[in-house]
Image: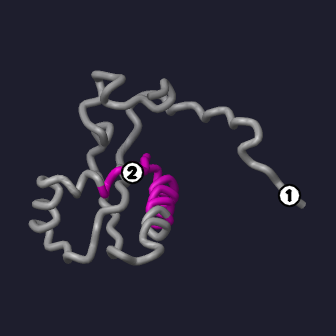
């Protein structure tokens, strides 16, 4: 992992994969729907934009499908009454930053090309 984006493996102060956020939202999509991933991440983006507007910090975290494919994840989905045709796509954490905000990363050359 990178210094700019540490994980629980890199930093023992991080107690879980959600950076100890007090609120974690799970975004679900309908299984076998062609645009479920795109829809879920558009929803996640709108959630973090709305959170920012309210002064709440947030983070989009992938791996929801893998998390809820595990036995414990499947049990949660059943307990929550999630229909069988739905699957987890993304997480959005909500809370307040404890410490300085991370700095923006420099953009890599030739990643964006404008064709006129």
Residue range in magenta is: 42-65
Q: Residues within 10 Å of mark 2 (few under 14, many from 20)?
A: some
Helix, strand or loop at label 2? It is loop
Q: Quadrant of the C terminus?
A: bottom right
Q: Residues within 10 Å of mark 1 (few under 14, many from 20)?
A: few
Give left or right: position of 69 versus 89: left
> Where does residue 1 sit, x and y in percent of width and height?
44, 28
Helix, strand or loop at label 1? It is loop
> Where does residue 26 sit, x and y in percent of width and height?
30, 60
- The residue indicated by pointer 1 is 115
Question: Is 29 located above or below residue 13 in the figure?
Answer: below
Question: Is 75 located above or below residue 17 in the figure?
Answer: below
Quarter of the image where one finds residue 30: bottom left
Tell which circle, 2 or 1, labels the residue nearer the N-terminal end. 2
- The residue indicated by pointer 2 is 62
> Where does residue 67 sit, x and y in percent of width and height?
25, 51
Residue 13 part of the magenta-drawn span: no
How far, Cα to Cα, is label 2 from label 1?
A: 31 Å
Quarter of the image where one finds residue 85: bottom left
Residue at point 62%, 33% (across, down)? 105
Residue 53 part of the magenta-drawn span: yes
Residue at point 34%, 50% (across, down)? 63
> Where does residue 16 sit, x and y in percent of width and height?
25, 36
């Amino acid at each position: 992992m990178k210094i700019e984006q540490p994980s629980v493996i890199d930093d023992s102060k991080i107690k879980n994969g959600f950076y100890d956020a007090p609120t974690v939202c799970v975004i679900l999509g309908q299984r076998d729907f062609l645009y479920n991933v795109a829809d879920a991440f558009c929803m996640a983006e709108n959630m973090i934009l709305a959170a920012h507007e309210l002064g709440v910090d947030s983070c989009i975290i992938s791996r929801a499908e893998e998390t809820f494919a595990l036995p414990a994840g499947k049990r949660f989905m059943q307990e929550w009454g999630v229909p069988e045709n739905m699957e987890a796509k993304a997480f959005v954490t909500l809370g307040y930053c404890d410490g300085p905000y991370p700095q923006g990363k420099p953009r890599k050359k030739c990643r964006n090309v404008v064709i006129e």
